[in-house]
């Protein structure tokens, strides 16, 4: 897969900080440390019925394993 264009650091992210960029068009997640791309992964994001919420967020909880079920 092609390497993404280098991204400027998001607001509130400083050089050396770990952060992720979710590309909905390419269905990929890019993991960075500062401006250095560390890894990338294929992902399945939301659908038209249950769209992925976009924006800039801080990670507040990391789970190694969890059910991916929604309401109901």
Image (cartoon, helix red, strand yellow):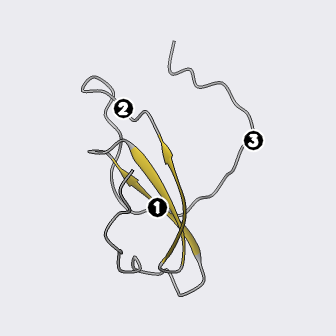
First in residue order: circle 1 vs circle 3: 1
Q: Residue 57: which numbered mark, if any?
A: 1
Task: Where is residue 72? Give x, y as percent.
Answer: 51, 12
Separation of marks 1 and 3 at Cα, in angstroms: 19 Å
Secondary element at image label 1: loop
Separation of marks 2 and 3 at Cα, in angstroms: 21 Å
Q: Dot 2: within a 10 Å radius of its alpha carbon, few (fewer than 14), some, or many (20 or more) residues?
A: few
Is 23 or 61 nearer to us in this picture? 23
Rendered view: 69 above or below 26: above
**Quadrant of residue 47 in the image?**
top left
Q: Give the foreground label among 1 and 3.
A: 3
Q: Is residue 12 left or right of residue 54?
A: right
Q: Dot 1: within a 10 Å radius of its alpha carbon, few (fewer than 14), some, or many (20 or more) residues?
A: few
Please give the name of the residue rendered at 70% of the width and 30% of the height, measured from the top-left corner: 66
Q: Is residue 56 left or right of residue 25?
A: right
Rendered view: 21 above or below 27: below
Q: Residue 46: which numbered mark, if any?
A: 2
Secondary element at image label 2: loop
């Amino acid at each position: 897969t092609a390497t993404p264009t280098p991204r400027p650091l998001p607001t509130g992210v400083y050089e050396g900080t770990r952060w992720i960029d979710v590309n909905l068009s390419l269905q990929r997640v890019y993991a960075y440390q500062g401006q250095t791309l560390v890894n990338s992964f294929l992902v399945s994001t939301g659908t038209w019925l249950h769209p992925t919420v976009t924006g800039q967020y801080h990670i507040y909880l990391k789970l190694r394993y969890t059910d991916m079920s929604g309401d109901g």
